[in-house]
Image (spheres, rainbow, N blue to C red):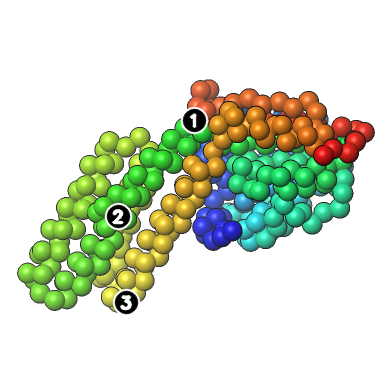
Amino acid sequence: MSVSHWESYYRAGGLATCPTGPDGSYDQEVRQAWEAFFEPLPDGAALLDVGTGNGAIPLIARELATRLHRSWEIHGTDLAPIDPARDVRDGRRRFAGIVFHGGVATETLPFADASFDAVSGQYALEYMALEPALTELQRVLRPGGRMQFILHHVDSVLVANARESLGHAELVLRDTRVYQQLRRLLAAERESPAAAETAAAAMNGAAARLHAAMKQAGSPLILHVTLDALTQLWDLRRTLSAADVASEIEKVESELQASVQRLEALAGHALSADDVTAMMQRFSALGFTGLQREPQVHAGSNLVGWRIAGTKPAVTADHD
């Protein structure tokens, strides 16, 4: 499975996907859910966050441990080659003491049996091969250990925004082909005034369609970023060679295509109520008890996911 589109996102320094607070991390009810999960852990507990990305959940755990005057051993794994200490602003200080393992699949965790008191993940488990991932999580949890995951909800505001953004990306990349229009305009400027006038008219028409769509959009980020990029790329022709400007256009277009891959994955892996029921049944078959599921909200009423939790019994039995 390719993770290059996630690698580019994490390398850019984003701490978490939405919903986030001013510091770029999860806040309000989402943060409260994680703090409530971690707070019962005693001094010396070991935690594992899977699909950790740039470490938003381990960071919440670390900050809570500091407030509680406890010391927890915190690990984060991700299939992408992550390095939050390098890529996140002030990462070396913020992630001090947290151990990250890049290039690690949850389906084949590199930890001994019964290594952790808690396992967690946000917007992660739903992307994995469920059966081997759950088996590994059960294996590395200690008897009496707890798990909690926040998963994408098919009816969440995040999924709705993702679908709208995919439509905007289609408008940019396929309908208006605005970056191709920009390339033609730059080439036409070097040909003749008449060619430049014709290309400019086509470019302005494409940009006008994007502006009109942005006025109607509920989540206009892709359109806003695209229009800003077009202005910046146009200005670059004054200081860069034609080849360098073309390279910058290619880079911006590739970043949008990577965003499309992430959005398609989000929408495609969001879970219905039946999907969550099936997942809970698999947890139960592996011996987990005290299983809970409920919608996760943010900022009062915004549905942002499912939250599921459970416990590995202190005394386990073999399960088919």
Residue pointed to by mark 2? 174
Q: Residue at x 30, y 55 (%)?
A: 174
Percent position of residue 213, x then y: 26, 41
Up-down relation of residue 176 to residue 310 (above or below): below
Q: Do callouts 2 and 3 mark residues in contact (Cβ within 8 Å)?
A: no
Q: Give the quarter of the figure containing the C terminus.
A: top right
**Is residue 54 something that shows in the picture?**
yes
Q: Which of labels 2 and 3 is toward the front? A: 2
Query: Could you tell me the amino acid type at mark 1?
Result: Asp
Label of residue 155 in the image: 1
Mark 1 nearby-residue class (10 Å; few <14, some 14–19, many ≥20): some
Residue closest to the far right: 315
* The quarter of the displayed image where residue 242 is located: bottom left
**Is residue 68 something that shows in the picture?**
no
* Label 1 – label 3 distance at C-alpha: 45 Å
Q: What element carries label 2?
A: helix
Up-down relation of residue 302 to residue 85 (above or below): above
Query: Could you tell me the amino acid type at mark 3?
Result: Ala
Q: Give the quarter of the figure containing the N terminus.
A: bottom right
Q: Do callouts 1 and 3 mark residues in contact (Cβ within 8 Å)?
A: no
Mark 3 nearby-residue class (10 Å; few <14, some 14–19, many ≥20): few
Q: Residue at x 35, y 44 (%)?
A: 167
Q: Which of labels 1 and 3 is toward the front? A: 1
Up-down relation of residue 30 to residue 256 (above or below): above
* Label 2 – label 3 distance at C-alpha: 23 Å
Query: Could you tell me the amino acid type at mark 2?
Result: Arg
Residue pointed to by mark 3? 243
Q: Do callouts 2 and 1 mark residues in contact (Cβ within 8 Å)?
A: no
Q: What element carries label 3?
A: helix
Q: Which of marks 1 and 3 is nearer the N terminus?
A: 1
Q: Is mark 1 on a helix, strand or loop?
A: loop
